[in-house]
Amino acid sequence: MKTRRVRGGLRLGGVLALAVGALVLPAQAAAAPAPAVTTGGVSNVAYSSVILYGYVDARGELTNYYFQYGATSAFGAQSPLAPAGNGTSTVKVSQAVTGLQPGIVYHYRIVASGPGGTVKGADRTFETPKVPLSVQIVGTPNPVVFGSSFFVEGTLSGTGASTHEVVLQANPFPYLGGFKTVGDPEVTNSAGGFSFPSLGLLENAQLRVVTVGKPVVASPVVVENVAVRVSFHVRRARRRGYVRLYGTVAPAEVGALVGFQLLRPGKSVNEGGTAVTSGTASVSRFRAVVRLRHRGLYRALIKVTNDGGHVSNYSEPILIR
């Protein structure tokens, strides 16, 4: 076989043989670096919100970050994804988180993700503050008619408000004896609600509800008024065109003014009156003969003026034909 040298190699029997030498391949692209992160502190810690901080070094690659948080180290929730840029130095980032519960220790950490992978910061914790306890109450109905039942209802709000013992305290007119606990404690329900049944009040009283144990928290004072009980009756008088109006008032309110009112749509018209006279130690009476100018519904108003222990009240209306 003839061998002939040609440029760049040898031709063997008409076949070109390349010279064997080092074959140089393109260098593989370097792997993108993963971002670096550090979990930072917190600020503006409130009952239901907080601002979380962290540090991200994107290392020249487009990087996003978010915070994981929750009541355990398993987290369970995360903030929205946010951009951290593609810089080559560490930047401080933050996210506001809402919807938290008061009095809870929360775990949190920062997580950053880029072309080079996902990196998680260290697990840190913060505690949301407890909501201070507060009590609001109302008497239902108020005023209550003398001898009738009523309720003191309300709500205990704040951290630990459910299944919490509360007591009702009263300071009767003339409000000089101070508050004293009435009846047994009640336990609030899961929503902090409670209800104390009728006390059988005989006169106006200041009422409040106080928590049992620490911290001791009292509601604002509510005055439960006791309205006099009024009965009202009618009977024909001997004189034509006149009627006899009479009734009782309890407790006794001798000297109180009585007004007989004709009820009209949207208003009442005074059709005469009298004064309460003595009856028994607990019940006083009133009576009067009046000229009946109009037929219709009438009621009696007992106007209490000299008794700070009770308030005025109306009778049930009666129909006079």
Image (spheres, rainbow, N blue to C red):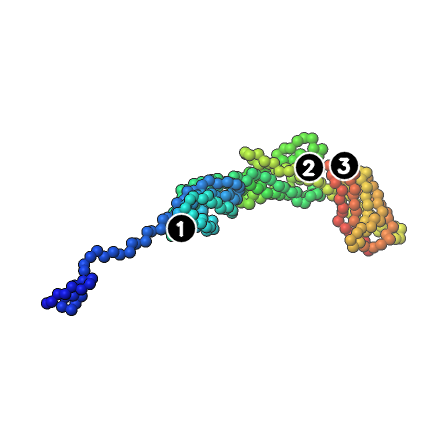
Identify the amino acid type marked 2: Ala
181 sits left or right of 63 in the view: right
Residue at the far top: name it. 177
Residue 61, disc: 1
Label 3 – label 1 distance at C-alpha:
84 Å
Residue drawn at the location 52% of the way across and 39% of the way down: 129
Label 2 – label 1 distance at C-alpha:
74 Å
189 sits left or right of 107 in the view: right
Identify the amino acid type marked 1: Glu
Percent from the top left, x then y, of residue 16? 18, 66
Percent from the top left, x then y, of residue 213? 54, 34
The answer, for residue 267, to whether it is visible in the render is yes
Q: Which quadrant of the structure image shows residue 25?
A: bottom left
Mark nearer the viewer, 3 or 1: 1
The answer, for residue 185, to whether it is visible in the render is no
Q: Secondary structure at mark 2?
A: strand
Identify the amino acid type marked 3: Asp
Residue drawn at the location 61% of the way across and 43% of the way down: 154
89 sits left or right of 130 in the view: left
The residue at which mark 2 appears reads as 205
Q: Secondary structure at mark 3?
A: loop
The residue at which mark 3 appears reads as 307
Q: Nearer the viewer, residue 48 or 292?
A: 48
Residue at the far bottom: name it. 14
In the image, is residue 174 above or below residue 154?
Answer: above
